[in-house]
Amino acid sequence: MCDGGAVDRVFVGVFLNAYETPPAVIVLDLDATDDPLHGEQEGRFFHGYSGCSCYLPLSIFAGNHLLLAWLRSASLDASAGALAELLRIVAQIRDRWPQLRIIVRGDSDFAHDAIMSWCESSRVRNVFGLARNPQLCVAIERQLVTSRRRCQQRKHASRRDRDFRCRTLESWDRSRRVVGKAEHLPQGANPRFVVTS
């Protein structure tokens, strides 16, 4: 019988043993990527964003090192289980390197209050994509206008940034730092946002 916990620890152990001395900083990348299915596999689920029946595995990488590969049904939220896995992985890393600077990074699927709150209370920096919405676009409206004008004058992409505080109406328990990229391309506006520590 396979001991799943022991297997999970091996992945992190291989990463730790790859270094003679601790790195100055590591970035833990969270990702949930669709894995399309072509049969009647157990746990399959039609995922509307992917447009197919698939699994939605969760992976965590540190550079090229795979620290977690967890096969999950696509019926779950992309962030399901991510916090528990981060707790385990960061604890194992800090057992070896207690002072290591750690950054957690992911797309907007992981910009959940529980994950960010844990990072903030655990000396773990974080940066997550943030889905565009009207409130965020209003916050960078002046920068978007400037980028549009410069793009039209120069006929190539123009970007401006704005750093501001933001709080969701219900899902975050506090305001957080958001950085907005007010980009305008010849094809049109392309605003992007991240929430970060």
Image (spheres, rainbow, N blue to C red):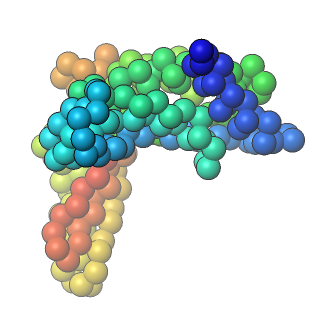
Where is residue 169, by image quadrant? top left
Identified at 57% across, 28% down, the residue is 124
Q: Nearer the viewer, residue 133 or 140?
A: 133
Number of marks in the image?
Answer: 0
> Seen in the image, is 107 located left or right of residue 70?
left
Where is residue 125, by image quadrant? top right
Q: Residue furthest bottom?
A: 154
Identified at 28% across, 80% down, the residue is 156
Q: Position of residue 143 (x, y in %)?
A: 25, 59
Q: Nearer the viewer, residue 140 or 34?
A: 34
Kindly tell me whether residue 48 is visible in this rendering.
yes
Q: Position of residue 52 (x, y in %)?
A: 19, 45
- Asked if residue 56 is positioned above or below residue 141 in the image, the reply reads above
Kindly tell me whether residue 74 is visible in this rendering.
no
Where is residue 75, by image quadrant? top left
Q: Position of residue 147 (x, y in %)?
A: 25, 68
Identified at 54% across, 32% down, the residue is 68
Identified at 26% across, 84% down, the residue is 154
> Seen in the image, is 95 located left or right of residue 38?
right
Q: Nearer the viewer, residue 106 or 182?
A: 106
Q: Position of residue 146 (x, y in %)?
A: 23, 66
Please state, as top left, top right, bottom left or bottom right, where the N terminus lies in the image: top right
Q: Residue furthest right?
A: 20
